[in-house]
């Protein structure tokens, strides 16, 4: 019975994580379409690549065409629109958030760019339960410590 409830809880957690991740994808697409953020870089790795997006709203600066030529700016705008469409259509997703001093950027990629599909995981919760079982079996831990620890994690 407990195994079923754990699986049910994992399914609920995975759906919640997926919904939150999808919401962040939609917000990123809206920020791209409203020109609040823009492409600022491309990360190349063997067999795959990802786009990095950021801007003033994230503490950075907006990328603009070097020579201020309209065609260069239009190319940047088209790339932003394509990324937004791919995010909305769930062809790509957020693959990372990078924080530096004073700014942060978001990486987006997906299977069409060689990056594996990002799927929700409840591994952290499962690892916590395994850790708890091992500690309980092999070490003597004061019960009040475990009860305080459990209140914060479950």
Image: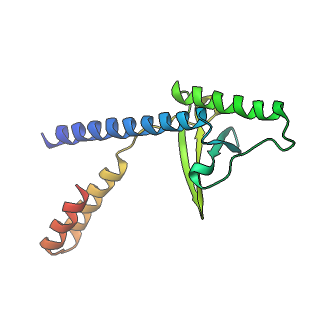
**Side of 132 where 75 appears, left or right:** right
**Side of 126 where 44 appears, left or right:** right
Q: Measuring 60% from the left and 41% from the top, which residue is drawn there?
A: 36
Q: Position of residue 143 (x, y in %)?
A: 13, 71
Position above or below: 6 against 79: below
* Front-lying residue, 38 or 94: 38
* Front-lying residue, 111 or 21: 21
Q: Position of residue 44 (x, y in %)?
A: 71, 44
Q: Measuring 87% from the left and 42% from the top, which residue is drawn there?
A: 67
The reply to whether residue 130 is in sight is yes
Q: Give residue 43's quadrant in the image.
A: top right
Q: Measuring 35% from the left and 52% from the top, which residue is drawn there?
A: 124
Position above or below: 117 against 122: above
Q: Give residue 65's quadrant in the image.
A: top right
* Front-lying residue, 98 or 69: 69
Q: Measuring 20% from the left and 61% from the top, which residue is drawn there?
A: 150
Which quadrant does the C terminus fall into? bottom left
Position above or below: 86 against 32: above
Q: Position of residue 85 (x, y in %)?
A: 58, 26
Which quadrant does the N terminus fall into? top left
């Amino acid at each position: 019975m407990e195994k079923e409830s754990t699986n049910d809880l994992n399914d609920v957690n995975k759906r919640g994580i997926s919904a939150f991740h999808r919401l962040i994808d939609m917000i990123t697409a809206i920020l791209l379409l409203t020109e609040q953020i823009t492409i600022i870089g491309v990360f190349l790795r063997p067999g795959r690549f990802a786009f990095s997006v950021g801007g003033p709203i994230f503490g950075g600066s907006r990328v603009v065409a070097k020579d201020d030529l309209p065609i260069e700016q239009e190319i940047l705008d088209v790339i932003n629109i394509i990324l937004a469409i791919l995010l909305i259509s769930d062809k790509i997703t957020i693959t990372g958030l990078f924080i530096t001093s004073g700014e942060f950027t978001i990486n987006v990629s997906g299977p069409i760019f060689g990056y594996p599909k990002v799927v929700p995981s409840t591994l952290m919760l499962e690892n916590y339960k395994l850790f708890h079982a091992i500690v309980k079996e092999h070490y003597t831990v004061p019960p009040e410590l475990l009860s305080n620890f459990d209140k914060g994690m479950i």
